[in-house]
Amino acid sequence: MRHRKAGRRLGRTSSHRDAMLRNMVTSLLDQERIVTTVPKAKEARRVTEQMITLGKRGDLHARRQAMSYIRSKNIVAKLFDQLSSQYAERKGGYTRIIRTGSRLGDAAPMAILELVDYKEIVSEVKAEQDQ
């Protein structure tokens, strides 16, 4: 029985799962949009929302807590400088999961995990070229 055990195992050892989630959260905060499976997206969303909340707090202890998880100074700087001010008025729900169907190889449910204020640069460039 798994009473009071939070989080998904995702078929990995704990060290592999922790490393994978660290990489996913770092990529999401860097690129603001990633494509993954639905269970992985739901787990990465939990951690990403916690990191953005740390960024909104903005003190030294929060920066050190984020640095202990993300381990990339550039991404932590982006989190505390750009993203924290971007989500200053929002009280939660910083990410969005968009389901995209099944993967061809193994029929795994796929999803796009993105930050809420993500704007696709490609569509803006195409709009400028059309004018």
Image: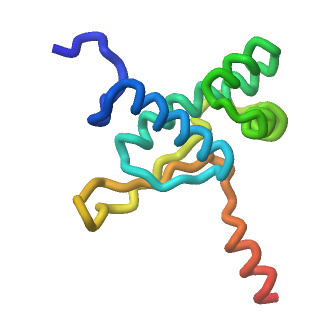
Name the image quarter holding the N terminus. top left
Q: Is residue 131 left or right of residue 126?
A: right
- Tell me if residue 65 can be seen: yes
Viewer-closest of 49 and 90: 49
Q: Position of residue 73 (x, y in %)?
A: 76, 33
Residue located 80% across and 21% down the image: 58
Viewer-closest of 58 and 30: 30
- Tell me if residue 87 can be seen: no
Q: Is residue 44 above or below residue 62?
A: below
Q: Position of residue 5 (x, y in %)?
A: 31, 15
Q: Is residue 111 above or below residue 131?
A: above
Residue located 43% across and 52% down the image: 36
Q: Position of residue 67 (x, y in %)?
A: 70, 24
Q: Position of residue 39 (x, y in %)?
A: 35, 41
In the displayed image of the protein, which residue is found farthest to the left? 1
Viewer-closest of 70 and 37: 70
Residue located 40% across and 32% down the image: 16
Q: Is residue 56 above or below residue 93?
A: above
